[in-house]
Image (spheres, rainbow, N blue to C red):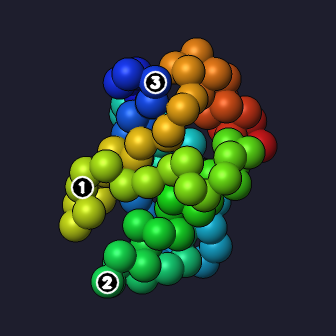
Amino acid sequence: MRGVGGDVLLKVRAAPGASRDRVVGLHGDALKVAVAAPPEKGKANLAIARLLASALGLSPAHVRLDSGAASRDKWFRIEGAPLEAARLLVRKCLEA
C-alpha cells in the first residue's frame, strides 16, 4: 500500500472463481481477495473492486483497478483516502 497524491494504491492478490467473495488475508505484501466471479472480461476485477469498497465502507465509485487487469497481482486505487485511514480500514478487513 502506498499513497499517491490524495489517493492510496492497494496491492491485491486475486483469487477468482472462489466459492464466495471474501478478503482472505495477506499474501506477502498484498491483500489476498477471493471472488466467485470468473477471470474473464473483467468480471473478477469488478467483483474485487466492489468487495474492497464494501469492506472499506466506501462507495464503489471510489475504488478502481489501476493496473494488472490480466494478472493475479493487481493495484487498486482508493480515491480520496488518506494513507493512514486506508491502513486502518485494511486492518479492519483482516479482522472481520
Q: Residue furthest right?
A: 96
Question: In this image, 41 relative to 86: left or right?
Answer: left
Residue at the disc numbered 3: 6
Residue 85 x/y as whole percent: 64, 22
Q: Earlier in the sequence, mark 3 or mark 2?
A: 3
- Sooner in the amino-acid sequence: mark 1 or mark 2: 2
Crowding at mark 1 (Cα within 10 Å: few <14, some 14-19, many 20+): some
Residue 96 in picture, x, y percent from top left: 77, 43
Answer above or below: position of 17 versus 58.
below
Say which residue appears at 66% left-offset and 38% top-offset: 94
User: Visible in this render: residue 33?
Assistant: no
Please give left or right for residue 85 compared with residue 66 in the image.
right
The residue to which callout 1 is attached is 68
Q: Which mark is residue 17?
A: none
Secondary structure, mark 1, is loop
Place residue 8 in its image quadrant.
top left
Residue 37 placement, left or right of 39: right
Residue 7 seen in the figure: yes
Q: Secondary structure at mark 2?
A: loop
Q: Up-down: is 58 above or below 44?
A: above
Instruction: Residue under label 2, please give it.
Output: 41
Please name the residue shown 67% across and 53% down the image.
59
Real-space Cα separation, disc 1 to disc 3, in angstroms: 21 Å
Q: Does residue 32 lie above or below 71 as drawn?
A: above
Q: CA distance from mark 3 to mark 2?
A: 30 Å
Q: Residues within 10 Å of mark 3 (few under 14, many from 20)?
A: few
Residue type marked 2:
Lys
| Residue 87 in which image quadrant | top right
| Nearer-N-terminus badge (1/3) | 3
**Residue name at image x 31 percent, y 83 percent:** 41
**Residue type at tag 1:** Gly
